Image (spheres, rainbow, N blue to C red):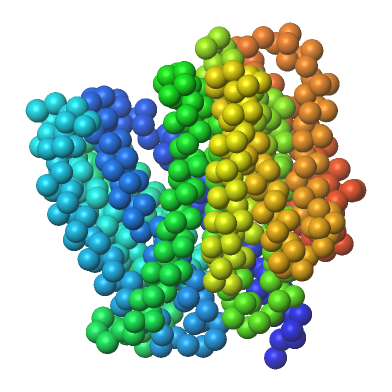
Amino acid sequence: MPSLKTIKQQKALKVSKNAATQMLGRILYLATRVALPPFILHYISLEEYGIWATCWIIIGYVGMGAFGVSNVYVRYVAEYNATNRHKEIGPLLGAGLSITIIFSVITLLGLWFSLSWLYAAFKIPPHLQQTAAILILGTVATMLLDMTFGAFAYVLQGLQKITQQTVVWIASYLLETLMMVVMMMQGWGVTSLLLAFVVRYLLATLIYVVLCYRAIPGLKIQLRGVRWETFQLFFRYGGMMQISGLLSVFLYSCERLVAGTLTGVSAVVLLDIGQKFPMMSTQVFSSATNSLLTALTHYHSLNQKDEIIRLYLRASRYLNLLNGCALGFMAPFAVPILNAWVGDNPAYHEAGLIFVCAAGGYHLHALTGPASTYFQGITRPGSAIWGYLVPQMFLLGTGLEGAYSLLGHTILAVVAAATGARILSSGLFLLYTNSQLGVGQWRWIRQALLPGLAPYGVGYGLAVASQGFLHQLGTGRLVLIPALAALLVVYAIVLFMVFYIVFCQTDERQTIKRLLGKLIPLGMGRSG
């Protein structure tokens, strides 16, 4: 029988494996989404692609109606699994399916009767309206299918079979990408995008169902006689998650909305360019927190407070370190990176400062992920609303007044107010979470915060040292890209040395030595 220490190590390894798989999946997904548009536009008109992009806007709004459902599945399946109450998963699925099926039918009917309004709102020309109807109804129906029967994917997450679920997700969107490419080249046109989208979700859903029944052989979905208490989980816990999701979307879009009303659509473009890399970086690494909810719920259900604290500190440390490693290089080299990406356009010069502000704001915002997940795991999702989102809204409102008085009604004033609100509200929420967990503030600063801030020191030091070199190179892409790549290598080497000497814990040093011990003999064997 394995020892308690071995069991804990196995659980920690499982969480790490789940997190790594999710980050890899997110990186691959973003890569496909970046690569596809130029290829697609080679085969279809801009108007047709505009309709496809419109479908995703509609999907985004419709999807906001079911923010909380997935969280209910993940959180309570994790609890039932931890406490060996697998029979309660069937009624939970029955209640969730009943709610989402009713929502889906109402949504599709409402969308059908709203098509003429959508044609006018998005200015779709008459000769493309039939195509638009097929694409809009097809994509929304597919999304509602995933929202309903995607429940089986969330059950797998709750059972901590996240690697299985993520592998299916990766395979499905890679198949979708391949189908899009092949059918486009065969002349199927914009319809190929819808067909690939439908096949992706149908195939993934079928595989999720099979995997769920393999994991729980006696699973029975109960649609009749489900207790009202089970439905209340979706209305209470799910409702709070719904509110949290809506407020997050509002805060994300508010900055762009305010900037756009002040200085026009050019401000929205600047924000999009300046925030693109920091947002993508934090989104990739924050995807790892999806595996954290099941683990925290598991330990909470078993009343293992020490394990919760250990997992919270470890997740915060590595999430902060990963974001720090990426943004610690991006922020100091924001202007060269933007010049290499979009060129040295005078209209984009303010984007460099926006980039730096976004790096700091979104970095600390990402660090609230483990804190918010902790409150979700202990069935207190409202703490993240009142402790983080509402204060951020208040700070943004008051901060705008102060920023306007100092910087005028400019885009930089909006960015300064939003960044300040994001950083201050994140900091206060993290201090509150630490106190609720009983984690000493200095312990959290030493173990979780400082390791993620150190990369900025290395990055800015390298930026100062290489300033003259980059200035001599100019702003051409052909010289900037290899120069930035070389500086990134130097940055990585110096950062590794700093981390190993100053911040590395004993178990981390042992892991690094073990990995280097495997790599160095391998390299020597190849050279020989």
Instruction: Point out residue 77 in the picture as x, y percentages from the top left corner.
Output: 47, 76
Q: Residue furthest right?
A: 501
Q: Residue at x 81, y 21 (%)?
A: 464
Question: On the picture, is 482 further left or further right than 270?
Answer: right
Instruction: Point out residue 172 in the picture as x, y percentages from the top left corner.
Output: 37, 55
Between residues 235 and 451, which one lies in front from this camera angle?
235
Question: On the picture, is 296 further left or further right than 105?
Answer: right
Question: On the picture, is 427 further left or further right than 126?
Answer: right
Q: Is residue 131 visible?
A: no
Question: On the picture, is 226 further left or further right than 350?
Answer: left
Q: In which quarter of the view is residue 494 placed? A: top right
Q: Residue at x 64, y 63 (%)?
A: 16
In this rendering, is residue 489 above or below 11?
Answer: above
In this rendering, is residue 244 above or below 118?
Answer: below
Q: Residue at x 54, y 64 (%)?
A: 381
Instruction: Point out residue 76 in the picture as x, y percentages from the top left corner.
Output: 48, 75
In this rendering, is residue 222 above or below 367?
Answer: below
Instruction: Point out residue 31 in the picture as x, y percentages from the top left corner.
Output: 47, 39
Q: Is residue 428 visible?
A: yes
